[in-house]
Image (spheres, helix red, strand yellow):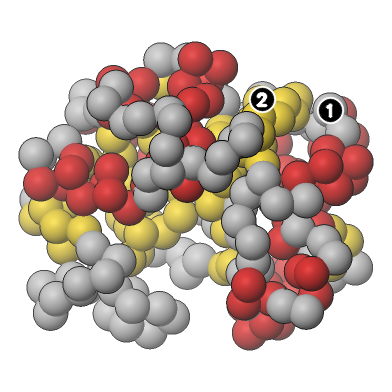
Amino acid sequence: MNVPVAILAGGLATRLRPVTQHMPKAIVPVAGRPFVFHQLELLARNGFLEAVFLIGFMGEKIVEAVGDGSAFGIKVRYMTDGPGLLGTGGAIARAVPQLGNSFAVLYGDSYLDFDYQAACRHFEKDGRPALMTVFRNEGRWDTSNVALLDGEVVAYSKIAPNPQMKHIDYGFSLFNSSAFASVPTDRATDLAVIFERLAASGNLSAFEVHQRFYEAGSFSGLQELEAYLSGASR
């Protein structure tokens, strides 16, 4: 399944201050190179042909570092929020005309070394307008925020988790454009709100991943990712 990947890279990265006072999170060094270089190469290795960065804070530095993506084997385009911040959900809704009928979404600080195409095949077969990759976290690396039942996300919440939530949003999702049909493009909306609505209406499929996730959004996450990448390169 060949779909573009929208990469959410517009945040302020406050957990990485003071480093991110002068650079966006995407280009913070990991294993000797900007994080985004590793992320794009991973996507290219997994068969993706195009990535669309949804940029905001110091986004021009991402453009300068990445360019058209040819150095990483993947075509790269960019979209900005415009005059006002749109949040993760609003940024995606605004980008839908450029993303097409089906597309993937990846958090800008996620390094997910798993079988992306297996998730894509599941999305195609399932037929629901959205799919969330999930990991059985049980509170180990972050707060679990997903409840599953028979391969479906039946509850999701970042702000009010409950004991039935054993899994966590892994960081990669797939959508049909219809999932964003009612999302405004002129004011901020969080992607979490969209996930909550999809789960409540029975429209959010789940694909369980068994490899742990890595992230570049915190200093501890950077250390773990650096160790993983260093081991993978040997």
In this rendering, would 137 be left or right of 202?
right
Q: Nearer the viewer, residue 127 or 192?
A: 192
Q: How many angstroms separate mark 1 from mark 2 (CA)? A: 12 Å
Q: Which residue is mark 2?
A: 49
Q: Nearer the viewer, residue 209 or 28?
A: 28
Quick one: label 1 or label 2, which is nearer the N terminus?
2
Q: Nearer the viewer, residue 172 or 126?
A: 172
* Structural crowding at the residue carrying mark 2, measured as other residues with C-alpha within 10 Å and reported as few (<14), some (14–19) or many (≥20): some
Q: Nearer the viewer, residue 24 or 186?
A: 186
Q: Residue at x 62, y 32 (%)?
A: 82
Tell me, for residue 68, which label it has, or none: 1
Q: Is residue 16 above or below residue 1?
A: below
- The picture places residue 53, in percent across and down from the top left corner, at 66, 37
Q: Is residue 6 above or below residue 178?
A: below
Image-quadrant location for residue 157: bottom left
- The picture places residue 172, in percent across and down from the top left corner, at 45, 48
Q: Residue at x 16, y 36 (%)?
A: 203
Image-quadrant location for residue 24: bottom right
Query: What residue type is disc 1 on?
Result: Asp
Describe the element under mark 1 as helix, strand or loop.
loop
Q: Residue at x 36, y 59 (%)?
A: 169
